[in-house]
Each structure stands twice: as C-alpha cells, then as structure tokens.
C-alpha cells in the first residue's frame, strides 16, 4: 500500500485512473477479459462501446461499487477493490458522479440536493453553504430554480442540477454516466459546454461514458472503444473516426450489422422455423 | 427548509407526546394503578374474625364510592382475629366514630372490599382509632349451608362486635 | 428449450430469511452512524408515526365500539355485563391493540417505506448517496427502522386509549351500563405490568419486525416499477404473517 502511494506521489502527472488486467464475469457472462486503461489526469476521456459491453460496470469498478474478479483499478494510486469501506468513502468524496437518470433526492429542493454533500460531510456555516450552492447553481444556470422540487424539473434541468451537486465539493475526478441520453439538442449542447468548461477551468479529470459519437467528438481528448470484453480501439476521436477497422466503422459509422451482430446468438433460423431439410 | 425541518420536529414531538399521554392514561386510569393513588390518608383499625379473600390495597367504600384502601392485614396473636388497617383519604375525614365496617364481595364472584356504614355520632374517627362495629366476610359456603338447613337466612348476619363471637 | 432450473421454494425462502437476518445486522451496525442523521430520524417518526395516527385512531375507536357491543350482548346472557370494561380492556391491551395496530401499521407505514426506498433504489438515489460517500444504511434505512420501533408502541397506546373510549361510549352512554361499574371493574383487574406493559413490549417487537421487513423489501427490490409493486405487496403479506406468528409465540412465552 505504501509503495503504491510512493509511486503515485513521484509521478503525479501520470494517469488519474489506471486499470490493469481487469476481468469481470457477471452471471456467467464475461464482461471484461483483461482490459488495460489509462485515464489521463486533467483530460476528458470517453469510454464508448455497444450497449451491454459493460461501460457502466467499468464505472462501478472505478468507484468501488463492484469488485472485479481479477485485475487492479487504481484511482490516484489507490487500488480500489482492496480498500476498506472507510477509505473507499474517503476516496469517493473526491469523485463527482453524474448519474444517467440524475438521481436527485426526491424529498429535497434543488438547493438542498446540491447542498446535500456539504451538509453530510462538512459542518459549514449556513451562509457559506448558501454561497457555495448558489455559485454551483449559477455555473449550471439554474440559480433561479433553487426552490423547485426535482419533480418540477425537466430532464435536462435535472441533469444540470445533478451536475451542480456532483461538483459542489470540487472533485478531482468527474464521472459522467451517459450524460447525453434523452436530452434535446439544446440541453445536450448545454451539458456538453458545461463538461468542457469544468474541465478547462478547474482541470478536473473526466471520464465520460456515452454512445453519441458526434457529441463525444466535440468534448473528448481521448476515446476508448470497448467491445467484446476488450479494448477494440483507442485514440483521439478525430483519429479514430478516420481509422479503418470493422469495429470503428460499425460503431462510429453506425452500420446496423458488423462485428457487433444485429442478431442475438440463436439456433439456425430455418431450424427454428421448422424446416428440417434446411439442416442438411 | 429550516422552516419545514422545524415543523417536522414539532409534529414528531407532538406525536410522541400524544403517545406517551395515551400510555400514561392507560396505565393510570384503566389499571390497578388507579387504586394506588395515595393522597394524604389517615389510618383506622378494624378487627374481623374472618377476612375471607380480602387483599392488601383492596378498596374501602362508602355507598359504593371509594375512599381509601387496605393498608395492612395482621393477625392479633392474643385475640386470634385479623387486624386490618384502613388508609382513608383525608378528604373523607368526617366519618362518625360509630361507623361500621364490613367485608363485601363485589358481584357474586368478584374481589372483596371493605364497606363502611356511617353511624350517627357527632364525634369523628381520627388517625389510630378503631372501628368497633365490624362484620366479617360473608363466606359463600356458609351462606349455602344456611340456605340448605333453612336457618335464619332472613335476618342479617349478626354483627361481630369486638369480642368476635363465632358465626352460628 | 429447457428453462433454467428454478430454485426450490424452500431454498428461496431460506435465502430470503438469511439475507433479511444479515440486513438486520447491517442496520444494527449502521445505527451508531445514523445518530449523526438525527434530523432524518425525527422526520421519519413524523412520516411513519404521526401520519399513521388518523387510521389508527379511527380504527381504535371502532374496534372498541364493536368489541363493547358484541361483548355486551354475550355477557348479558350470563348476567355479567359488569365485566364489560375488564374484558374490553384486557382483550385490547393484550391482543387486539398490538395486533390490529401492527396490521394497520404494516399497511400504512410499511408499504410507504418499502415504496419509498424501492423508488430510491430504482431511481439510483441510493447509489447516488453511496457515491456521495453517504451510507444509505445509516441515512435511509436505520432512521426508518428506529422510527418504526419508536412509533409502534406509541400508536398502540393511542389505539388502546381510543378503544377504551369507544367501548365506554357504547357500553355506558348507549347501552346504559353504570359508569362506576365499567371503570371500577376494569381498574380492579387490569395490571400495569402484566397487561399494559406487556402489550407495549409486544408492539415494540412488532414495530421492529415490520420496519425490518419494509426496509429490507424496499432496499433489495429489483430496480423496476413492477419490482417496487411486488415488494410493496410482499411487505404487507410477510409483515402480517410474521406479526401473527410472533404474536402467538410471544403470548405463549410472556403469559
């Protein structure tokens, strides 16, 4: 443990998140089969891949919600799967996580939702809490909505409130789980702009899981394409878009069939329909 | 927010208060605790040749109204009768000193209590006095016996008096 | 086309029981940490306890009235209407109060706790708390558990008090039983420890069991809308069965 910390201390500019030989089997299905990833500090790294390739699972490994079957996940030099609960919670205090469905606490107003992490971990004077929360809400453009309940928000507004909540404690690592899903183009641009601004102004390391290549291309510095339990491709988004591989072609070009089959694995079609002679 | 927090606190407080009030009500008004209520009392003695199933803290009543409770029951080893100390509420301090005490049964099979029949004397009972006129517990067996032999069941049971003569 | 073998009902129930037991240990371990969220416990006492008052009070009143009516006619056959207060009080304090309140509590508070926690699970609010380094066991589950344990005995006392008032209303004001007889016989035969406190102890246990079942079902529900619906139903069914079974066991031991 101490040696780990020494290593990370000597190379602070190295990866914020370092995944080595990650192997995960869920319900008998191999999700990851020896994946290596490096999330560069201060950059926006996108993780892409077809549905069901375990992008969210990867995030759960990074945040310690799920232990892998093999391999290591180091966040700031700490091997997440081996951390005690207390240390894991201490680590999570430095991580901001934007949930796919915003996950705002329904009992609280927008203001209290954003204030929640502050109130839970710090004993701050009320005026300071107010100041911090309002600056964060201002940053996402929703200072005027502070008194609303989550049920009164649209999807895009809820996502922005969740973003304000995620950044309220100045995390060093931001994780966005599918932040673009279900947003109209305006809201999508707002969220995109926020991610980019946060990264540029605060130098936060960001991990972004998304499907929308067009959006990712505008914000990400580096892209990992995960498919079939492996890293299928990686690189700068522009470069990936040019690269000629069946995976990238299908995924970025949006072809229906390719290495990712359109058909779920099944028995022979003709046999299923009951034409025995077709088996010959 | 602080406002609503406050109202939750007040609401919960009221609820807890109501719950405990209900508990206190149940405990003091519906149970035997209601009979423990001990204000200021004065004690008078009474001798009975037979107290039947009279128990400690059994009620003392005048005209059916409770005025106190049995404080102690002891056997006088000379006279061989039961000495019962009656703790009577000081609110009922004006009992004539020729009042009579008797042991009754509430209902046919209920608990026993001491009933007091006020007399007409101008003097009142004071702390430590003794009620001279007493009547022992009516034993169901005796009653049945009397009834069967056709005895003098019409006349009221004889008053014992201090010499505590045995039942006929 | 063979379906995957379904686990047997016995194994499934055992697994449920086992995980509920472990969940209980999780709650107990989280209680010291939940003391930091005292505000939340107070809020839950309001939601779980005070919000159940109306139904508990109404039902208490009617149960007392019905009990009085039924017993009056039965007792009058034996000329024992004087015992009405006693019988009503004893049956309320020992059995009907704790059991009926527990069933009402499971239906009113238990289901809402299950649905609430289940929805928090389904909308990732529990995961969000985990990610904000807030332990949902300490922040969400333990306060509701404590509130259940606190609220149930208080609700039972309210139920009993209203039941007695209802019985008095019917017995004395309506059927013309003597007021002194009603109270006198009751106070003569009802014991604080054996009857009232016993009922309170029972109801505390019921409160703990219902709160455990409700939070467990909510916490472990599949994060879908039908998952939450089933979990709510299961809360009522399991609570009712467990409460009645426990009632028998506890009566056998406490008598």
Image: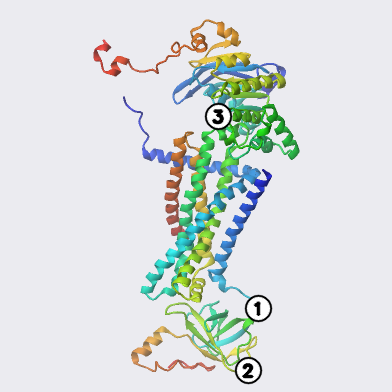
State yes or no: discs 1 and 2 in contact (Cβ < 8 Å). Answer: no
| Gap in angstroms between the C-alphas marked 1 and 3 | 71 Å
> Of marks 1 and 2, which one's residue comes earlier in the chain?
1
Q: Residues within 10 Å of mark 3 (few under 14, many from 20)?
A: some
The x and y percentages for residue B87 are 60, 81
Q: Is residue B50 above or below residue A223?
A: below
Q: Which chain letter goes with mark 3?
A: A
Residue A64 visible? The answer is no
Is B9 left or right of B146, judged from the image as shown?
right
Q: Residue furthest left?
A: A277
**A7 or A251: nearer the viewer:** A251
Q: Nearer the viewer, residue C212 or B23?
A: B23
**Residue at figure coordinates x 48%, y 39% from the top left:** C19
As measured in the structure, the alpha-carbon distance from the residue carrying label 2 to the one carrying label 3 is: 90 Å
Question: Compared with residue C100, is residue A38 higher up or lower down, i.e. above or below?
Answer: above
Label 1 neighbour load within 10 Å: few <14, some 14-19, many 20+? few
- Check the residue under mark 1 and report the chain it is in: B
Q: Are marks 1 and 3 in contact (CB under 8 Å)?
A: no
Secondary structure found at label 2: loop
**How many angstroms separate mark 1 from mark 2 (CA)?**
23 Å
Q: Residue A208 in the image: x percent, y percent?
A: 59, 20
Front-most of B21 and A36? Answer: B21
SS state under label 3:
loop
Residue at image point 49% right, 49% down: C108
User: Residue under circle 2?
Assistant: B122
Mark 3 = which residue? A101
Given this view, does label 1 or label 3 mark the residue nearer the observer?
3
Q: Which residue is mark 1?
A: B40
Query: Where residue A244 sits in the image (x, y, percent)?
Result: 52, 5
């Amino acid at each position: 443990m101490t040696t780990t910390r020494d290593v990370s201390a000597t190379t602070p500019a190295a990866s914020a998140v370092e995944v080595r030989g990650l192997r995960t089997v869920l319900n008998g299905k191999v999700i990851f089969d020896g994946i290596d990833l490096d999330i560069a500090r201060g950059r926006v790294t996108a993780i892409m891949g077809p549905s069901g390739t375990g992008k969210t699972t990867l995030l759960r490994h990074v945040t310690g919600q799920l232990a892998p079957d093999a391999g290591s996940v180091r966040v700031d030099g700490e091997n997440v799967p081996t951390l005690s609960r207390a240390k894991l919670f201490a680590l999570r205090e430095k991580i901001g996580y934007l949930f796919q469905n915003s996950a705002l606490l329904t009992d609280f107003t927008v203001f209290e939702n954003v204030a929640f992490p502050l109130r839970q971990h710090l004993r701050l004077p009320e005026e300071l809490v107010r100041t911090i929360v309002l600056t964060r809400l201002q940053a996402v453009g929703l200072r005027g909505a502070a008194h609303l309940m989550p049920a009164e928000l649209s999807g895009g507004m809820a996502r922005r409130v969740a973003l304000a909540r995620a950044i309220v404690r100045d995390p060093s690592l931001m994780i966005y789980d599918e932040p673009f899903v279900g947003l109209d183009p305006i809201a999508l641009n707002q969220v995109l702009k926020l991610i980019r601004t946060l990264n540029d102004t605060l130098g936060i390391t960001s991990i972004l899981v998304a499907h929308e290549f067009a959006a990712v291309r505008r914000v990400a510095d580096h892209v990992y394409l995960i498919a079939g339990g492996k890293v299928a491709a990686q690189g700068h988004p522009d470069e990936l878009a040019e690269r000629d591989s069946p995976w990238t072609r299908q995924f970025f070009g949006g072809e229906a069939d390719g290495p990712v089959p359109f058909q779920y694995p099944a028995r022979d079609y003709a046999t299923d329909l009951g034409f025995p002679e077709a088996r010959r | 927010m602080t406002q609503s927090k406050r109202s939750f606190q007040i609401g919960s407080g009221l609820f807890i208060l109501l719950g405990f009030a209900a508990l206190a009500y149940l405990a003091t008004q519906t149970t035997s605790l209601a009979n423990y209520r001990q204000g200021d009392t004065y004690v008078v003695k009474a001798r009975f040749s037979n107290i039947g199933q009279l128990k400690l803290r059994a009620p003392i009543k005048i005209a059916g109204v409770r005025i106190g409770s049995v404080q102690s029951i002891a056997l006088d080893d000379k006279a061989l009768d039961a000495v019962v100390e009656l703790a009577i509420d000081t609110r009922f301090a004006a009992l004539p000193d020729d009042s009579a005490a008797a042991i009754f049964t509430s209902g046919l099979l209920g608990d026993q209590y001491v009933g007091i029949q006020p007399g007409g004397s101008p003097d009142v009972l004071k702390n430590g006095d003794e009620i001279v006129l007493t009547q022992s517990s009516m034993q169901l067996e005796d009653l049945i016996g009397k009834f069967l032999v056709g005895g003098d069941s019409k006349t009221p049971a004889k008053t014992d008096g201090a010499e505590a003569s045995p039942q006929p | 086309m063979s379906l995957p073998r379904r686990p047997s009902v016995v194994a499934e129930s055992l697994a449920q029981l086992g995980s509920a037991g472990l969940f209980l240990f999780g709650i107990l371990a989280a209680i010291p940490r939940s003391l930091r969220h005292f505000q939340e416990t107070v809020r839950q006492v309001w939601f779980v306890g005070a919000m159940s008052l109306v139904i508990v009070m109404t039902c208490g009143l009617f149960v007392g009235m019905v009990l009085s009516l039924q017993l009056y006619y039965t007792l009058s056959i034996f000329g024992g209407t004087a015992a009405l207060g006693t019988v009503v009080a004893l049956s309320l304090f020992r059995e009907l109060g704790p059991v009926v309140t527990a069933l009402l509590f499971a239906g009113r508070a238990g289901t809402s706790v299950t649905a609430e926690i289940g929805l928090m699970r389904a909308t990732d609010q529990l995961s969000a708390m985990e990610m904000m380094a807030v332990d949902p066991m300490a922040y969400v589950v333990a306060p509701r558990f404590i509130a259940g344990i606190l609220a149930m005995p208080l609700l039972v006392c309210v139920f009993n008090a209203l039941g007695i008032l209802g019985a008095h209303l019917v017995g004395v004001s309506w059927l013309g039983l003597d007021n002194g007889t009603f109270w006198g016989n009751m106070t003569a035969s009802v014991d604080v420890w054996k009857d009232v406190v016993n009922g309170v102890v029972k109801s505390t246990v019921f409160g703990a069991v219902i709160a455990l079942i409700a939070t467990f079902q909510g916490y472990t529900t599949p994060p879908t809308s039908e998952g939450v619906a089933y979990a709510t139903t299961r809360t009522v069914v399991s609570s009712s069965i467990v409460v009645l079974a426990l009632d028998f066991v506890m009566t056998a031991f406490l008598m």
